[in-house]
Image (spheres, helix red, strand yellow):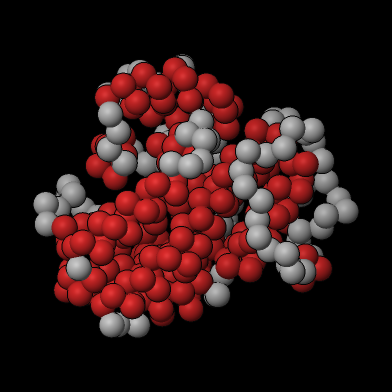
């Protein structure tokens, strides 16, 4: 699958992704994820998680950047499809931590330090979920086919609290960006703070066997999603050298199925991703 990514727009002057506070957290995450994956099991979470957090924020950043570009270029359907996936990735990441990973770690290690991470989710999760709901609603106005992404579980979300997300009007990229700016820094601040709770001495309290069991369960859950959108989204969110370490795949899956079978199904969505070239023969090497 050949790709020609969309030209990357410049950040507006008031972009939350260009503030010093935001950039400081990104620099810290890059520092903690420097080098290659550590050989020791208890060192790996503190190396792996910064990269996961970086690719989540990279996807949200592109969602922010391309909002008005997609409207101007009459490509809103594909843009909203990509935004839907980007919001879901953040939601799924945190719901997995809240419902399974951190409570299990705390129980097995006899330490409630990871429960602090769950509390921090409340600083951004409601406006983030509102943004996701807005994206899905706006997409539903334009297409008949349902989104392949699972429905949000926010049954009691009060959208009237978010005047920038007016469901009575067409998609407003400026208002949507303004809404995103309300949760971007609380989110990235949490993602940076979480890394200290993954120190090797804390992970060793969890135990290698427990960690392996939990990660196997999480991987099984993730594999239940259609790779045409879930795996492709992950593989277009980070440089290929990081993808191959974080999500090692059999050669035939990475080099053949991703570029030629799974990637093409939603190819127009990946043109909004940070690394669409990863879904090509040359880019997947």
242, above or below 25, in the image: above
Pick the residue in front: 123 or 102.
102
Side of 172 where 187 appears, left or right: left
Q: What's the residue at 47%, 20% (across, down)?
A: 261
**Residue reaching furthest to the left:** 39
Q: Position of residue 115 (x, y in %)?
A: 41, 78
Q: Position of residue 104 (x, y in %)?
A: 36, 71
Give the position of the C terminus as an image quadrant. top left
Side of 103 where 71 appears, left or right: right
Q: Is residue 240 visible?
A: yes
Pick the residue in front: 16 or 97.
97
47, above or below 285, in the image: below
Q: What's the residue at 74%, 41% (across, down)?
A: 139
Pick the residue in front: 34 or 205.
205
Q: Is residue 6 visible?
A: no
Q: What's the residue at 18%, 49% (across, down)?
A: 37
186, above or below 27, in the image: below
Q: Position of residue 58 (x, y in %)?
A: 45, 48
Q: Quadrant of residue 50?
A: bottom left
Q: Quadrant of residue 24?
A: bottom left
Number of dots carrying numbers = 0
Pick the residue in front: 19 or 278.
278
Q: Position of residue 245 (x, y in %)?
A: 25, 42
Q: Quadrant of residue 183?
A: bottom right
């Amino acid at each position: 699958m050949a790709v020609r990514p969309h030209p990357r727009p410049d950040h507006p002057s008031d972009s939350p992704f260009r503030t010093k506070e935001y950039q400081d957290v990104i620099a810290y995450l890059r520092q903690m994820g420097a080098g290659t994956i550590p050989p020791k099991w208890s060192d790996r979470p503190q190396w792996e998680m910064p990269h996961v957090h970086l690719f989540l924020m990279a996807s949200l950043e592109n969602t922010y950047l391309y909002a008005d570009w997609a409207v101007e270029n009459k490509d809103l359907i594909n843009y909203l499809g990509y935004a839907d996936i980007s919001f879901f990735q953040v939601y799924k990441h945190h719901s997995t931590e809240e419902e399974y990973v951190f409570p299990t770690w705390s129980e097995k290690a006899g330490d409630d330090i990871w429960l602090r991470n769950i509390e921090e989710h409340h600083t951004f999760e409601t406006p983030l979920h509102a943004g996701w709901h807005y994206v899905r609603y706006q997409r539903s106005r334009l297409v008949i086919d349902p989104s392949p992404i699972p429905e949000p579980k926010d049954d009691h979300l009060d959208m009237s609290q978010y005047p920038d997300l007016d469901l009575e009007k067409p998609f407003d990229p400026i208002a949507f960006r303004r809404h995103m700016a309300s949760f971007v820094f609380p989110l990235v601040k949490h993602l940076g703070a979480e890394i200290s709770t993954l120190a090797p001495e804390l992970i060793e309290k969890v135990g290698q066997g427990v960690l392996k069991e939990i990660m196997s369960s999480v991987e099984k859950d993730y594999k239940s999603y259609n790779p045409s959108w879930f795996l492709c989204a992950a593989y277009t969110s980070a440089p290929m050298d990081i993808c191959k370490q974080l999500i090692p795949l059999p050669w035939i899956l990475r080099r053949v199925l991703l570029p030629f079978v799974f990637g093409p199904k939603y190819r127009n969505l990946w043109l909004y991703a940070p690394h669409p070239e990863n879904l090509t023969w040359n880019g997947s090497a």
